[in-house]
Image: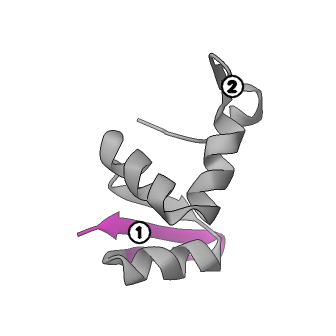
């Protein structure tokens, strides 16, 4: 299942906007750990080098490199 994609700026669950969660994934390590555990997220597709570096230090591995992004898997 997809957690966040390009349509999510308009998504809401109650008072929570998915866009706010998306931004917190990038900036708040504790929130990221909580969300990834809660939703059993084991694959991330991103272009963001800061997030890639953070995930790698947390044990994630780059599975695929493409010109438009990376696929990381939790080991």
Query: 64 or 35: nearer the eye?
Result: 35
**In this figure, which residue is indicated by the disc labeled 2?**
11
Q: Earlier in the sequence, mark 2 or mark 1?
A: 2
Q: x, y (%) of residue 12?
A: 67, 22
Q: Residues in magenta?
A: 62-75
Q: Which quadrant is the C terminus positioned in?
A: bottom left
Please give the residue where the numbered disc 1 appears in the rendered image: 72
Which residue does the image show at 34% across and 66% down from the upper left?
73
Q: Is residue 60 left or right of residue 23?
A: left
Residue 67, horizontal then vertical, whole percent: 64, 77
Q: Residue at x 57, y 61 (%)?
A: 28
Disc 2 crowd rating (10 Å Cα; few below 14, some 14-19, many 20+) is few
From the image, state whether disc 2 or disc 1 is nearer to you. Answer: 2
The CA span between labels 2 and 1 is 25 Å
Q: Residue 53 appears at what percent x and percent y?
A: 51, 82
Residue 7 shows in this picture: no
């Amino acid at each position: 299942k997809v957690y966040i994609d390009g349509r999510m700026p308009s998504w809401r669950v109650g008072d929570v906007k998915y866009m706010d969660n998306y931004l917190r994934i990038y900036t708040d390590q504790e929130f990221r750990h909580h969300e990834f555990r809660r939703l059993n997220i084991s694959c991330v597709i991103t272009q963001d080098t800061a997030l890639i570096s953070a995930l790698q230090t947390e044990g994630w591995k780059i599975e695929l490199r493409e010109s438009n992004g990376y696929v990381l898997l939790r080991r």
